[in-house]
Image (cartoon, rainbow, N blue to C red):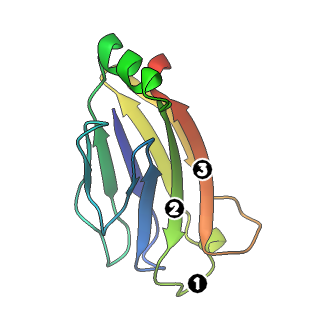
Amino acid sequence: IQISLTWNESPSDLDLYVVTPFTKLFHGRRQDDDCLCHLGADARKGYGPETMTFQRLSKEQHASHLRSGRSCCLHIYVHNYSEECDLTESAAILTIMSESGILYQAEVPKTGTGEFWDVCSIDMRHI
């Protein structure tokens, strides 16, 4: 599974964040071995892409997480790190893909305020 974030030239730096049951992944923490995921390059000059790649967990791995009180959900959001313009002006697009193609795609809302775009949550047991 790959999550990809692209945007316009401005703002120069949007950051992809994924909260796993174990940690928060972003440019400062790039890998989570429990969820078998890692963040690619940190794009800081506009356009992106920033990518996060996940390996599918086995049924046994999912069951182990659930037994330990951890969910199998990922929460995805975007941070307007450079704040050069409103996030709503970035034309950001987040795409979630699997081997079979696009599973989900979202465009940044055209209205709203703030530094963060709360994109979606994914239950990895259903992907």
Query: Between disc 2 and disc 3, whose residue precedes?
Result: 2
Q: Does the residue at mark 2 contact the one at mark 3 (Cβ under 8 Å)?
A: yes
Residue carrying label 2: 78
Tell me the distance, in whole angstroms, between the alpha carbons under discs 1 and 2: 14 Å
Which corner quadrant of the image does residue 114 belong to?
bottom right
Residue lying farthest front?
68
Circle 3 crowding by C-alpha within 10 Å: few under 14, some 14–19, many from 20: some
Between 41 and 93, the residue placed more toward the observer is 41
Q: For this rendering, which residue is in front, 72 or 104? A: 72
Q: Position of residue 113 (x, y in %)?
A: 73, 74
Mark number displayed over residue 119 = 3
Q: Which residue is mark 1?
A: 85
Tags 1 and 2 touching, CB below 8 Å:
no
> Which image quadrant: the N terminus?
top left
Mark 3 or mark 1, which has the lower sequence index? 1
- As helix, strand or loop, the secondary structure at mark 1 comes to loop
